[in-house]
Amino acid sequence: MVNAVPCPLTVARFVSGIDRQLADLGLKILCSSDFVAFEELCASLPGKGQASEFFSSRFFEITPRDGFWLRAIDEQGSTVHVQAMRVDRLDGMTLAEHWRRRYRRLYEQRQQGVRWDGTTSPIAEEITGTVVYHGDMYIDRNLPLKGISGPLAHVALGLALSKWEPDYVYGLVDYRFVRQGFTIREGYAHTQRFCAGWIKAPQGVEADESIVWMTRDDLIYLTARPLEWQLQARIKSA
Protein backbone atom coordinates (compact mmCIF):
# COMPACT_ATOMS: atom_id res chain seq x y z
CA MET A 1 0.00 0.00 0.00
CA VAL A 2 1.27 3.45 -0.88
CA ASN A 3 1.52 6.14 1.80
CA ALA A 4 2.96 9.23 0.08
CA VAL A 5 1.02 12.49 0.44
CA PRO A 6 0.86 14.82 -2.59
CA CYS A 7 1.69 18.51 -2.32
CA PRO A 8 -1.55 20.41 -3.13
CA LEU A 9 0.33 23.35 -4.63
CA THR A 10 2.38 21.12 -6.94
CA VAL A 11 -0.77 19.35 -8.17
CA ALA A 12 -2.60 22.67 -8.67
CA ARG A 13 0.29 24.07 -10.72
CA PHE A 14 0.39 20.87 -12.76
CA VAL A 15 -3.30 20.97 -13.67
CA SER A 16 -3.50 24.72 -14.26
CA GLY A 17 -0.33 24.70 -16.37
CA ILE A 18 -1.65 22.03 -18.73
CA ASP A 19 -5.05 23.75 -18.84
CA ARG A 20 -3.38 26.98 -19.99
CA GLN A 21 -1.37 25.22 -22.67
CA LEU A 22 -4.44 23.35 -23.93
CA ALA A 23 -6.19 26.74 -24.13
CA ASP A 24 -3.31 27.96 -26.30
CA LEU A 25 -4.12 25.04 -28.63
CA GLY A 26 -7.75 26.14 -28.82
CA LEU A 27 -9.27 23.72 -26.30
CA LYS A 28 -11.38 24.72 -23.31
CA ILE A 29 -11.70 22.12 -20.54
CA LEU A 30 -14.96 21.90 -18.59
CA CYS A 31 -15.64 19.73 -15.53
CA SER A 32 -18.97 18.33 -14.30
CA SER A 33 -20.43 15.72 -11.94
CA ASP A 34 -23.80 15.46 -13.73
CA PHE A 35 -23.62 11.92 -15.11
CA VAL A 36 -27.09 12.02 -16.66
CA ALA A 37 -25.79 14.87 -18.82
CA PHE A 38 -22.65 12.80 -19.46
CA GLU A 39 -24.72 9.92 -20.83
CA GLU A 40 -26.72 12.25 -23.05
CA LEU A 41 -23.55 13.90 -24.36
CA CYS A 42 -21.81 10.58 -25.08
CA ALA A 43 -24.80 9.32 -27.06
CA SER A 44 -24.65 12.44 -29.26
CA LEU A 45 -20.94 12.25 -30.14
CA PRO A 46 -19.99 10.72 -33.52
CA GLY A 47 -18.09 7.50 -32.96
CA LYS A 48 -18.55 7.50 -29.17
CA GLY A 49 -21.82 5.74 -28.48
CA GLN A 50 -23.33 5.19 -25.07
CA ALA A 51 -21.46 5.80 -21.85
CA SER A 52 -20.04 2.61 -20.38
CA GLU A 53 -21.78 0.66 -17.65
CA PHE A 54 -19.30 2.00 -15.06
CA PHE A 55 -20.72 5.50 -15.53
CA SER A 56 -24.34 4.62 -16.26
CA SER A 57 -27.17 5.98 -14.13
CA ARG A 58 -28.95 2.66 -14.72
CA PHE A 59 -26.51 1.00 -12.34
CA PHE A 60 -24.92 3.70 -10.19
CA GLU A 61 -25.83 6.95 -8.53
CA ILE A 62 -22.57 8.88 -8.89
CA THR A 63 -22.57 11.95 -6.67
CA PRO A 64 -20.11 14.89 -6.89
CA ARG A 65 -18.29 13.23 -3.98
CA ASP A 66 -17.74 10.07 -6.04
CA GLY A 67 -17.09 11.13 -9.62
CA PHE A 68 -16.51 13.76 -12.27
CA TRP A 69 -16.11 13.98 -16.02
CA LEU A 70 -14.25 16.32 -18.33
CA ARG A 71 -15.26 17.79 -21.65
CA ALA A 72 -13.08 19.64 -24.13
CA ILE A 73 -14.64 22.06 -26.59
CA ASP A 74 -12.87 23.61 -29.56
CA GLU A 75 -12.99 27.21 -30.74
CA GLN A 76 -16.24 26.52 -32.63
CA GLY A 77 -17.90 25.27 -29.44
CA SER A 78 -17.98 21.62 -30.52
CA THR A 79 -17.25 18.84 -28.04
CA VAL A 80 -14.09 17.06 -29.19
CA HIS A 81 -13.24 15.08 -26.07
CA VAL A 82 -14.74 13.45 -22.97
CA GLN A 83 -13.41 11.24 -20.17
CA ALA A 84 -14.67 10.29 -16.73
CA MET A 85 -13.52 9.16 -13.30
CA ARG A 86 -15.27 7.57 -10.33
CA VAL A 87 -13.99 6.40 -6.97
CA ASP A 88 -14.72 3.17 -5.10
CA ARG A 89 -13.67 2.82 -1.49
CA LEU A 90 -12.60 -0.81 -1.30
CA ASP A 91 -11.12 -1.04 2.20
CA GLY A 92 -11.22 -4.70 3.17
CA MET A 93 -11.97 -5.80 -0.40
CA THR A 94 -9.82 -6.26 -3.51
CA LEU A 95 -10.70 -4.97 -6.94
CA ALA A 96 -11.18 -8.58 -8.09
CA GLU A 97 -13.75 -9.18 -5.34
CA HIS A 98 -15.44 -5.91 -6.28
CA TRP A 99 -15.70 -7.06 -9.90
CA ARG A 100 -17.16 -10.42 -8.86
CA ARG A 101 -19.94 -8.58 -7.05
CA ARG A 102 -20.62 -6.21 -9.92
CA TYR A 103 -20.06 -8.05 -13.23
CA ARG A 104 -23.04 -10.37 -12.97
CA ARG A 105 -25.42 -7.41 -12.66
CA LEU A 106 -23.58 -5.27 -15.21
CA TYR A 107 -23.14 -7.90 -17.89
CA GLU A 108 -24.31 -11.49 -17.35
CA GLN A 109 -27.88 -10.62 -16.36
CA ARG A 110 -28.26 -8.20 -19.28
CA GLN A 111 -26.56 -9.87 -22.24
CA GLN A 112 -27.52 -13.40 -23.17
CA GLY A 113 -24.64 -15.86 -23.32
CA VAL A 114 -22.10 -13.64 -21.56
CA ARG A 115 -19.96 -15.72 -19.22
CA TRP A 116 -17.05 -14.91 -16.93
CA ASP A 117 -15.14 -17.62 -15.11
CA GLY A 118 -14.39 -15.34 -12.16
CA THR A 119 -10.64 -15.15 -12.73
CA THR A 120 -8.75 -11.86 -13.05
CA SER A 121 -5.28 -10.56 -13.72
CA PRO A 122 -2.99 -10.84 -10.66
CA ILE A 123 -2.96 -7.10 -9.95
CA ALA A 124 -6.74 -7.05 -9.49
CA GLU A 125 -6.26 -9.43 -6.56
CA GLU A 126 -3.91 -6.85 -4.98
CA ILE A 127 -5.56 -3.49 -5.67
CA THR A 128 -7.56 -2.25 -2.69
CA GLY A 129 -8.22 0.90 -0.66
CA THR A 130 -9.34 4.09 -2.39
CA VAL A 131 -9.52 3.04 -6.04
CA VAL A 132 -10.39 5.27 -9.00
CA TYR A 133 -11.67 3.99 -12.33
CA HIS A 134 -10.68 6.12 -15.35
CA GLY A 135 -12.59 5.48 -18.55
CA ASP A 136 -14.79 6.54 -21.46
CA MET A 137 -11.89 8.38 -23.10
CA TYR A 138 -13.06 9.84 -26.42
CA ILE A 139 -11.21 12.12 -28.81
CA ASP A 140 -12.78 13.35 -32.04
CA ARG A 141 -10.88 11.78 -34.93
CA ASN A 142 -11.09 15.06 -36.83
CA LEU A 143 -9.36 17.04 -34.09
CA PRO A 144 -6.32 18.61 -35.84
CA LEU A 145 -3.92 17.81 -33.00
CA LYS A 146 -1.54 14.95 -32.37
CA GLY A 147 -0.24 13.72 -29.05
CA ILE A 148 -3.20 15.27 -27.26
CA SER A 149 -4.38 12.16 -25.36
CA GLY A 150 -1.62 12.42 -22.76
CA PRO A 151 -2.22 16.03 -21.66
CA LEU A 152 -5.98 15.51 -21.58
CA ALA A 153 -5.61 12.42 -19.38
CA HIS A 154 -3.10 14.22 -17.17
CA VAL A 155 -5.65 16.90 -16.30
CA ALA A 156 -8.09 14.24 -15.07
CA LEU A 157 -5.36 12.35 -13.22
CA GLY A 158 -4.20 15.51 -11.46
CA LEU A 159 -7.75 16.35 -10.41
CA ALA A 160 -8.27 12.78 -9.13
CA LEU A 161 -5.09 13.00 -7.07
CA SER A 162 -6.16 16.32 -5.58
CA LYS A 163 -9.75 15.24 -4.91
CA TRP A 164 -9.28 11.71 -3.55
CA GLU A 165 -5.56 10.97 -2.99
CA PRO A 166 -6.29 7.46 -4.32
CA ASP A 167 -4.22 4.39 -3.58
CA TYR A 168 -4.70 3.30 -7.20
CA VAL A 169 -6.12 4.56 -10.49
CA TYR A 170 -6.92 2.00 -13.20
CA GLY A 171 -8.47 1.69 -16.62
CA LEU A 172 -9.66 -1.16 -18.85
CA VAL A 173 -8.57 -0.90 -22.48
CA ASP A 174 -8.39 -2.86 -25.68
CA TYR A 175 -4.88 -4.33 -25.92
CA ARG A 176 -4.31 -2.67 -29.29
CA PHE A 177 -4.24 0.71 -27.53
CA VAL A 178 -1.53 -0.61 -25.23
CA ARG A 179 0.50 -1.76 -28.26
CA GLN A 180 0.11 1.67 -29.84
CA GLY A 181 1.50 3.39 -26.74
CA PHE A 182 -1.76 5.21 -26.01
CA THR A 183 -1.86 4.28 -22.32
CA ILE A 184 1.82 5.06 -21.78
CA ARG A 185 1.24 8.57 -23.12
CA GLU A 186 -1.58 8.89 -20.59
CA GLY A 187 0.85 8.01 -17.81
CA TYR A 188 0.02 4.34 -17.18
CA ALA A 189 3.33 2.51 -16.81
CA HIS A 190 1.81 -0.76 -15.55
CA THR A 191 -0.18 -3.17 -17.72
CA GLN A 192 -1.52 -6.72 -17.51
CA ARG A 193 -3.36 -8.38 -20.36
CA PHE A 194 -6.51 -10.52 -20.01
CA CYS A 195 -7.79 -8.65 -16.96
CA ALA A 196 -10.93 -10.83 -16.75
CA GLY A 197 -11.40 -14.47 -17.76
CA TRP A 198 -14.22 -14.03 -20.24
CA ILE A 199 -15.59 -17.28 -21.67
CA LYS A 200 -17.84 -15.09 -23.79
CA ALA A 201 -17.11 -11.37 -23.49
CA PRO A 202 -19.92 -8.78 -23.29
CA GLN A 203 -20.72 -6.60 -26.27
CA GLY A 204 -18.19 -3.80 -26.49
CA VAL A 205 -15.59 -5.62 -24.37
CA GLU A 206 -12.61 -7.38 -25.93
CA ALA A 207 -11.74 -10.84 -24.60
CA ASP A 208 -8.09 -9.79 -24.22
CA GLU A 209 -8.92 -6.47 -22.56
CA SER A 210 -6.02 -5.15 -20.50
CA ILE A 211 -5.92 -3.45 -17.13
CA VAL A 212 -3.60 -0.45 -16.85
CA TRP A 213 -2.92 1.15 -13.50
CA MET A 214 -0.83 3.49 -11.43
CA THR A 215 -0.26 3.89 -7.71
CA ARG A 216 -0.45 7.08 -5.71
CA ASP A 217 3.35 7.27 -5.90
CA ASP A 218 3.10 7.06 -9.71
CA LEU A 219 0.56 9.90 -9.69
CA ILE A 220 2.73 12.08 -7.49
CA TYR A 221 5.70 11.41 -9.77
CA LEU A 222 3.62 12.29 -12.84
CA THR A 223 2.40 15.59 -11.42
CA ALA A 224 5.92 16.61 -10.35
CA ARG A 225 7.30 16.51 -13.92
CA PRO A 226 8.10 19.79 -15.73
CA LEU A 227 5.27 21.05 -17.91
CA GLU A 228 7.45 21.08 -21.02
CA TRP A 229 7.81 17.32 -20.53
CA GLN A 230 4.06 16.89 -20.09
CA LEU A 231 2.68 18.69 -23.10
CA GLN A 232 3.84 17.28 -26.41
CA ALA A 233 0.69 18.05 -28.40
CA ARG A 234 1.20 19.91 -31.64
CA ILE A 235 -0.89 20.98 -34.61
CA LYS A 236 -0.80 18.32 -37.28
CA SER A 237 0.99 19.31 -40.44
CA ALA A 238 -1.25 19.86 -43.42
Image: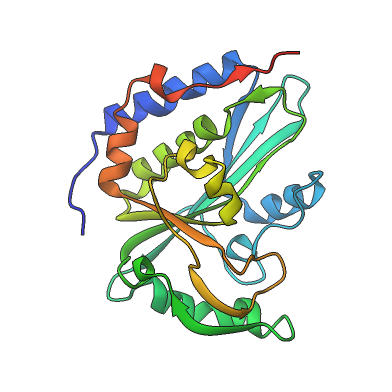
Residue 237 falls in image quadrant: top right
Q: Is residue 169 above or below residue 11?
A: below
Q: Observer-nearest residue: 128 or 205?
A: 205
The residue lying at 28 percent from left, 33 percent from top is 8
Position of residue 153 in the picture relative to residue 215 (left or right): right
Q: How many marks?
A: 0
Q: Quadrant of the N terminus?
A: bottom left
Q: Is residue 153 above or below residue 168?
A: above
Q: Measured from the top left, where is residue 219 in percent x and y?
A: 33, 42
Give the residue displayed 67% in from the left and 82% down from the top.
114
Q: Of all residues shown, which one is farthest toward the left?
A: 3
Q: Residue 75, image x and y in percent?
A: 73, 19
Identify the residue shown where x is 51% and y is 38%.
Answer: 153
Q: Position of residue 136 (x, y in %)?
A: 62, 51
In this view, the residue in front, 196 or 53, is 196
Q: Nearer the viewer, residue 109 or 73?
A: 109
In which quadrant will I find the C terminus?
top right
Res 149 quadrant in image: top right
Colouring mode (rainbow / by chain / secondary structure / one colour): rainbow
In the picture provided, is 89 more to the left or to the right than 181?
Answer: left
Q: Residue at x 70, y 50 (%)?
A: 37
Instruction: Name the spot of residue 191 as percent of width and height, x first.
Output: 42, 55
